[in-house]
Image (cartoon, helix red, strand yellow):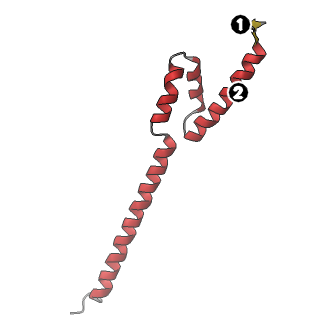
Amino acid sequence: MSLLGISIMNWLFLGALYVIPGIVILRKAGYSGWWILTLLVPFVSMIMPWAFALSKWPLEKEVERARNSARAEVVLLRRQLERDATAREQGPAGIV
C-alpha cells in the first residue's frame, strides 16, 4: 500500500517525528498535548504555531503570579519590620 509513492509505515514514522516532540513541547509550555491535533487541520496548522509563540504561556503566567506573590510577601514583611522598629523607638505602651 502506498500514498503518493510513500508507504503507510513511512507516513507513520514521519508523523511520529513531529507528533511526539510536539506533545512534549506543548506539555512543557503548560498546554495540553491534545493541541497537537491542530496539525491535522490545514490552515489552522499554519496559524497555531504563531498563536502559541505570541501568546503568554500558562507556565509564564504561573511564574509571574509567583513573582508577584513573593514581592507582596516582601512588602508585607518590610512593613511589619518598620512597625516593630517604630514600636521599639516609642517604648513600652502606657508609660508617659
1 up-or-down from 58: above or below:
above
Q: Which residue is mark 1?
A: 4
The reply to whether discs 2 and 1 touch (Cβ–Cβ < 8 Å) is: no
> Viewer-nearest of labels 2 and 1?
1
Disc 2 is placed on an element classified as: helix
Q: Residue at x 41, y 55 (%)?
A: 68
Q: Residue at x 44, y 51 (%)?
A: 65
State left or right for residue 93 relative to residue 63: left
Residue 63: percent from left, percent from top: 49, 50
Q: Residue at x 60, y 37 (%)?
A: 27
86 up-or-down from 71: above or below:
below
Say what amino acid the circle numbered 2 marks: Leu
Say what amino acid the circle numbered 1 marks: Leu
Residue 38: percent from left, percent from top: 55, 22
Q: Nearer the viewer, residue 82 or 19?
A: 19
Q: Which residue is mark 2?
A: 17
Residue 51: percent from left, percent from top: 47, 30
Residue 32: percent from left, percent from top: 57, 33
Q: Which quarter of the rendered picture does the C terminus lie within?
A: bottom left
Q: Earlier in the sequence, mark 2 or mark 1?
A: 1
Q: Nearer the viewer, residue 25 or 75?
A: 25
**Disc 1: CA contacts within 10 A as few (<14), some (14-19) or many (>=20):** few
State left or right for residue 18 relative to residue 54: right
Q: Residue at x 72, y 17 (%)?
A: 11
- Spatial distance from mark 2 to mark 1, Cα to Cα? 19 Å
**Disc 2: CA contacts within 10 A as few (<14), some (14-19) or many (>=20):** few
